[in-house]
Image: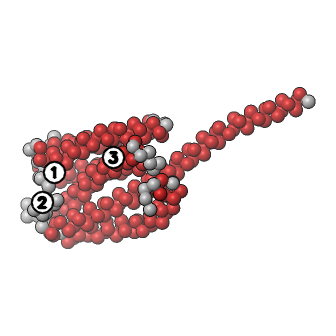
């Protein structure tokens, strides 16, 4: 089955109906296992103590915040270039989820930063660019609501989303381009991860759980958006039929009166 096979909303909804229950079960199970390893199996850090456990939420949330934006960008390309019928639906569905992950990353980072840095917030390059990411998510959500024409809204948001990729690149390389409080990449490196397996395994489990959560919420949001658009189309058709029916009734009444 290709992406264009899923261009038919009815076929897509059938697929979602089939896989969603399994995804929900997998997500709940992965979250339960990940949280157990994060809070009961992983050891304390010799410097951070119990505070290190916040990282098991913060790091995956930050990664998913960027992945959500990547999904929006790819969907925007699909909408602008290939005119895929569900691309703009995917982009619209990704925005609130991405905003939630971004907020969670910023909030958990602030909670961790207070005992470690002595403050909830610093104007660090990565923190600032992540705040910009949250503002972009909220702005895109607002634009979807403000522009009534779905086609125009999809085009405007697709362009803004693709421009915003610049900020994602800044987030990714900010720790290498500037002197920041955040450490350089310690998992995906040429010479292997710099994190001990006792910390790396819970991080991986939580990332998998958050990834499954994103896929589940994304499919649910796409399904809901398709249904909203169908209801809107039905209402518009009903509104256009009503005046025509009324006009026909008036014409018949006038003809009967003339006889």
In the depicted structure, whether residue 219 falls above or below residue 259: below
How many angstroms separate mark 2 from mark 1 (CA)?
28 Å
The residues bearing labels 2 and 3 have C-alpha atoms spaced at a distance of 27 Å
Residue at which label 3 appears: 73
Image coordinates for residue 86, horizontal then vertical, percent: 45, 50
**Residue 237 location (% of width, % of height):** 63, 42
Q: For this view, does 166 lie left or right of residue 3?
A: left
Q: Position of residue 165 (x, y in %)?
A: 27, 43
Q: Nearer the viewer, mark 2 or mark 1?
A: 2
Give the camera-side residue of 78 and 19: 78
Quadrant placement of the N terminus: bottom left
Q: What colouring does the structure picture have?
A: secondary structure
Instruction: Specify whether residue 122 is in view.
Output: no
Q: Secondary structure at mark 1?
A: helix
Residue that numbered label 2 is attached to: 190
Residue identified by numbered label 1:
113
Q: Nearer the viewer, residue 102 or 48?
A: 102
Quarter residue 251 falls in: top right
> Is residue 156 found left or right of 64 in the rendered image?
right
Residue 238 numbered mark, or none: none
Q: Give the total number of marks visible in the rendering.
A: 3
Residues at marks 1 and 3 touching, judged by CB atoms closer than 8 Å: no
At 12% from the left and 67% from the top, the residue drawn is: 196
């Amino acid at each position: 089955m290709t992406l264009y096979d899923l261009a038919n909303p009815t076929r897509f909804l059938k697929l979602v109906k089939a896989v969603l229950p399994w995804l929900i079960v997998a997500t709940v199970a992965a979250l339960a296992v990940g949280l157990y390893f994060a809070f009961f199996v992983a050891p304390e850090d010799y410097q951070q103590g119990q505070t290190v456990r916040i990282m098991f939420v913060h790091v995956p949330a930050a990664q998913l915040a960027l992945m959500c934006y990547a999904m929006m960008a790819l969907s925007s390309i699909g909408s602008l270039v290939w005119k895929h019928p569900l691309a703009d639906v995917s982009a619209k569905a990704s925005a609130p989820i991405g905003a939630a992950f971004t907020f969670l990353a910023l909030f958990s980072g602030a909670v961790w930063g207070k005992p470690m840095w002595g403050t909830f917030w610093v104007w660090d390059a990565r923190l600032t660019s992540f705040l910009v990411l949250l503002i972009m998510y909220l702005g895109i959500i607002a634009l979807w609501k403000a522009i009534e024409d779905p086609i125009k809204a999809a085009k405007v948001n697709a362009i803004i989303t693709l421009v915003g990729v610049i900020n994602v690149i800044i987030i990714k390389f900010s720790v290498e381009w500037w002197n920041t409080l955040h450490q350089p990449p310690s998992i995906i490196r040429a010479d292997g991860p710099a994190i001990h397996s006792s910390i790396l395994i819970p991080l991986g489990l939580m990332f998998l759980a958050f990834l499954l959560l994103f896929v589940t919420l994304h499919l649910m949001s796409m399904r809901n958006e398709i249904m909203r658009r169908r209801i809107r189309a039905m209402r518009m058709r009903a509104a256009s039929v009503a005046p025509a029916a009324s006009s026909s009734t008036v014409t018949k009444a006038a003809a009967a009166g003339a006889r």
